[in-house]
Every structure is written in structure tokens, then in C-alpha cells.
Image: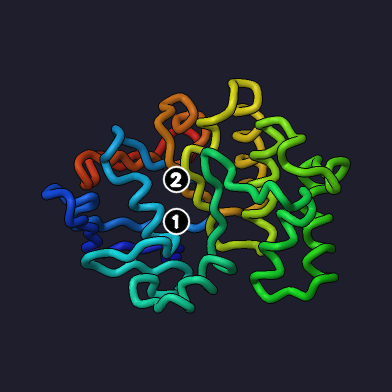
Amino acid sequence: MDPLISLRGVSRCYEATTQPALDAIDLDIERGRITAIMGPSGCGKSTLLNLIGALDRPTAGEITVDGARVDRLGQAAAARFRRTTVGFVFQFFHLLDDLTVRDNVAIAALLAGRTRSDAERQADEMLDQLGLAPYARRFPAALSGGERQRLAIARAIVNDPAVLLADEPTGALDRRNGEMALALLEDLNRRGQTILLVTHDEQLATATAHRIVRLIDGRIAADQHSRVAA
């Protein structure tokens, strides 16, 4: 089976630094798996996620995601790609505080081209699946940290993305809420969702990911399958 994500010779350099954030990375990501990206701060983990999600462009190399050459996308095409092919979950949620819980999810579907009625129907389905339906008319500030992260995940998956990109999704949560968010990601994966997870948490990665890729100084230092893969 062809990989869902493929990187060939991918580098990202920034003018302010002499050391590239990523240095000639070759990497394939399998469909239907949870892959964890680990490494010390500044090793290139978030840069890698941003490049795959078309939030940034490589200095060199090729990136293919679900058949699309991401490194070749113009600004408008990259925006469409982000709305339909990838879902983003961040450490600090990035919710829209002036929209209701329901509208935070529905807006992602609207931006992907759904009609208002279809977007609201999809939002209601997501909220029901994630246990957030009772809070649909509330605003994010009224939710707990764990509920806000569930809301962020609902928004990220409402358009059925090929891959969910999760950057430290439990980093701002206490242990209990972090475990609940992690259980949700595992459940999504059991339903077929491909997940690329950036984390500093060794225990989380070992217990959850089928594969762990470790970066050091912008290069792949280790690539191993975990016991979860069995």
C-alpha cells in the first residue's frame, strides 16, 4: 500500500538561524496508524507538522499527502487543502471564543464548502459523538480544558480529513483530561483515522503510537515500531 504521507529530501531553513529546522528528511507515514514524532525542543517536530499541513513550505524537497504535492500548492490551493485533507489539533485549542460550541465546529464545515444546513447537521453529529451535545449553545469559555480539547478535535475531524495532525494535544491538560483526550484519539484511530502526533511525553507515545519517529537537530535519529503495532 502506498503511504498516505511521503517526504523526500525535505529541508526547512530560516534566515535567522544557521542550523536548518529540518535537514533532508525522508519519511513515509502509513495510512490508518498513529505515528508519534518525538525529540527535544527545537528538533523540528512542529516544523514537520506545519509542512505536512501546508502551514509552511519547505526550502527544498517534496511532500505528498493523500496524492497531493503539498510543496507545490499555491496560497489558495493550500487553504483548500487545509480545510479538506488535514485536521489540526493544537496544545492551546485555538477555538473561536465569540462563537458557540456548535458554531466552532460548523464553521470548519462551512469553510470546506458545505451548505449551512449540512454544516450544522455535521456539527451536531460530531458533538453528539464526542459527548458535547449538551453544551452546543454555550461558548468555549464555559467548558473545562478537557471539553475544549474535545471541541477542538470535533472541529478537526468534521470534514473527515485524511490525516489528523496533533501538536502536543494533551500538553495543556491535567492528567485526567489528558487521558480522556488520548482515549478519544485512540478511538478515532480504531475507526480508521490516521493520526500524526507530536509529543514530548514518552509514556503517551509508547502507550498509544504504532510507530515512534525521533528527531534530533532536524534529522531522523530513530524510527521504531512500538508494541502497540502488534
Disc 1 from disc 2: Cα separation: 8 Å
User: Compared to 51, does 40 lie above or below?
Assistant: above
Image quarter for residue 144? top right
Q: Check disc 2 and give the amino acid type.
A: Thr
Coordinates of residue 17 in the picture (x, y in percent): 16, 49
Disc 1, disc 2: CB below 8 Å? yes
Q: Check disc 1 and give the amino acid type.
A: Glu
Name the residue carrying label 2: 35
Disc sitting over residue 110 in the figure:
none
As drawn, which residue projects farthest toward the left?
18
Coordinates of residue 187 in the picture (x, y in percent): 66, 42
**Residue nearest the observer in this picture, 50 or 18:** 18
Task: Please give left or right for residue 185 compared with residue 116 in the image.
Answer: left
Task: Please give left or right for residue 66 compared with residue 151 in the image.
Answer: left
Rendered residue at 68%/41% (across/down):
150
Task: Please give left or right for residue 215 compared with residue 174 in the image.
Answer: left
User: Compared to 38, does 16 lie above or below?
Assistant: below
Rendered residue at 46%/72% (across/down):
78
Name the residue carrying label 1: 30
